[in-house]
Amino acid sequence: MFLFSRRSLLSAAATVGGLALARRGMAQVGSGGTGISPAASIGTADLVTGAVTLYRDGQPPVPLESGASLQQGDQVETGAGAEVHLAFGDGGYLALRADSNLKINRYVVTGEATDIAAMTLVRGALRSVTGWIGKLDPQRYRIFAGAATISVRGTDHEVVLVQPQGGLPDAEPGVHDRVNEGATVLRSAGSAVDVAQGAAGYAPRGAAPRLNASVPAFFDRLRTPQDARVETQAREAQRRIEGRLRQLGRLGAGERFEQYRERLQARRRGRAAPVANPLPLSREQRRAAREQRRRARAGKQPPPAQR
C-alpha cells in the first residue's frame, strides 16, 4: 500500500532543488563517471527486499541489488512494500522504508575530522543509526527533509516526511522525528528543538518545530520485521566503527573509539585542520568570526580556528 503520494515526488524534488542552492556547502554532490570505482564507494546495499531503484548521474536507472556499491550523489527509491538497508563506510546504517526516496548529497569517509554526511529524504520514511561522523560532530551529519534539517548526537532515530496529499491519515503534514537512542536537533523556520531519547518532534512546513506530547503511533506502524536487523546494527555500532577505523589505520590494536575521539578533539584544540567545503555558517557566526579576526589583528587575542 502506498503511504506517500508519488505525485508529490515532483514537488518534493523541486523543494530539494531550492534547498540545494540555499545549502550549497552541504548539498553539492561529487558523483560522476560511468562505472563504480572502489575508491568512490561510500558504502553498500546491505539488504534489499522488493523493488528498489538506484539513480546515478549520467546513467539510466537500475534495480539496486544487495551488495551493490554506493557513491556520493546516488538516489535510492523503494517501491510499494519494498525496503533497503544501506551500510556506510563510517559504520552508519540506514533503513529506507517502503514508498520512499533518499538522495545521498555528500558522504566523505576518511577517518579524519573533515568527514561529513548529508542526505535528503525526498519522500517517505527512514531509520538511521549513525556512524562515527554523527558521534564525533553532530554538525557534520545532517538529514534534510522538506523544509527541516536534522542533526544528531550519536543517534538511532526515525524520520517521516508526510506530504499534504496522500500522506498518513493520522499524521500532520511536515517532518516527524523520533529518537530511539541519543538525541537530535530538529530545525525549521529559523528555530530549533532538542529531541531526547524516547521522544519525538514535529516540524510543520513553514513553522517552528515542537516536541510531541507522546510518540505518534504511526512510527510503530511503519516498522517492519527488518527493524530487528537495524536494532542489531545499533547494538554492534561501536564494534563496527572500531573495526572500520582500524582498517583505515586510525585506530591501533586494542584501542577504543573513545581514544580516537580524544585524539581528534586534542588536535582541534591545538591546531584545527582546514575543512574542504565546510558547512555554511549562520549570519551571527560569520559576524562573530569577523570580529574575532579583527581583534586578533589588533593583537588582543589569538585568531580563531578556521572551519
Image: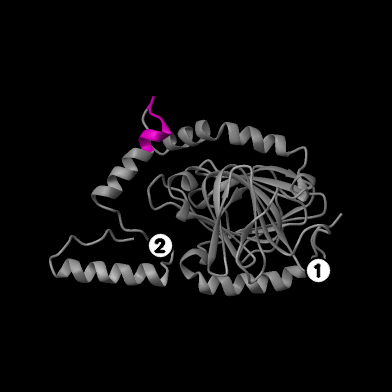
Q: Regarding mark 2 in the picture, which secondary structure is present there? A: loop
Tell me if I can see residue 184 in this picture: yes
Q: Position of residue 119 (x, y in %)?
A: 57, 58
Name the kind of residue labelled 2 in the image: Pro
Kindly give the residue lying farthest to the left in the view shown: 299
Could you tell me which residue is drawn at 61 percent across and 62 percent down? 209
Kindly give the residue lying farthest to the top in the view shown: 254
Nearer mark to the viewer, of 1 and 2: 1
Tell me if I can see residue 87 in this picture: no
**From what the image shows, is residue 261 above or below residue 283?**
above
User: Which stretch appears magenta?
Assistant: 253-260
Q: Which residue is mark 1?
A: 165
Q: Nearer the viewer, residue 60 or 31?
A: 31
Q: Position of residue 262 (x, y in %)?
A: 34, 39
Could you tell me which residue is drawn at 61 percent across and 35 percent down? 233
Q: How is the image coloured?
A: one colour
**From what the image shows, is residue 99 above or below residue 217?**
below
Q: Nearer the viewer, residue 139 or 120?
A: 139
Q: Position of residue 290 (x, y in %)?
A: 28, 71
Q: Earlier in the sequence, mark 1 or mark 2?
A: 1
What is the count of numbered marks? 2
What label does residue 80 carry, if any?
A: none
**From what the image shows, is residue 50 above or below residue 29?**
above
Q: Quadrant of the N terminus?
A: bottom right
Q: Residues within 10 Å of mark 1 (few under 14, many from 20)?
A: few
Q: Position of residue 303 (x, y in %)?
A: 21, 62
- Cβ–Cβ below 8 Å for labels 1 and 2? no
Could you tell me which residue is drawn at 64 percent across and 32 percent down? 232
**Side (left or right) of 211 relative to 169:** left
**Side (left or right) of 244 relative to 99:** left
Q: Which residue is mark 2?
A: 278
Name the kind of residue labelled 1 in the image: Gln
